[in-house]
Amino acid sequence: MKCPKCDSNIKKVEVSVEGAENKVVSYQCPNCDYFEFEPISSKKVVEELRETPLKIKQTIVKLSKDRLGIYLNSHIIRSLNLKKGEDIYVSVPDKKHIILEVE
Ligand SMILES: [Zn+2]
């Protein structure tokens, strides 16, 4: 395969994406800055990531005297479409889990 910009031979490079087993195939030109993702492989990775349940390590922070909290990062906020002031239900099914349920 040739680079559409400078006609050099293009290198096929597999890019790993965090949290996905599939790799994105990219084409990179060693001569100029031409770079392209192969659309079918990137679609696969995006679909895989969408199906993967989020598991994020969070640190418990102190809010006030005897109250603790966790921050919800932007991935969680976006996935669940959370907004400030919204009610959320917390249940504790056992000693190792906290379930947060959005209405
Ligand atoms: Zn090139």
Image (cartoon, rainbow, N blue to C red):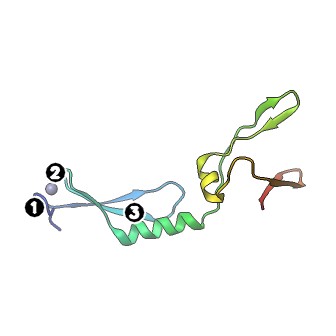
Q: Position of residue 31 (x, y in %)?
A: 15, 51
Q: Which residue is mark 3?
A: 24
Q: Which residue is mark 2?
A: 32
Left or right of 2? Residue 93 is: right
The dot on residue 74 is none
Q: Amino acid at mark 3?
A: Val
Classify 76 as above or below 58: below
Q: Nearer the viewer, residue 77 or 57?
A: 77
Which comes sooner in the sequence, label 1 or label 3? 1
Residue lying farthest to the bottom in this orientation: 40
Residue at point 62%, 58% (across, down): 79
**Circle 1 residues within 10 Å: few <14, some 14–19, many ≥20:** few
Mark 1 → mark 2, Cα distance in angstroms: 10 Å
Mark 3 → mark 2, Cα distance in angstroms: 21 Å
Q: Amino acid at mark 1?
A: Asp
Whether the residues at callouts 1 and 3 have beta carbons within 8 Å, the answer is no
Residue at point 20%, 50% (across, down): 33
Q: Position of residue 27 (x, y in %)?
A: 27, 61
Residue at point 88%, 31% (across, down): 66
**In the image, the residue with mark 1 has its CB under 8 Å from the nearest atom of ligand 1:** yes
Q: Position of residue 46 (x, y in %)?
A: 48, 65
Classify residue 53 by image quadrant: bottom right
Q: Which residue is mark 1?
A: 7
Which comes sooner in the sequence, label 3 or label 2? 3
Mark 1 → mark 3, Cα distance in angstroms: 23 Å
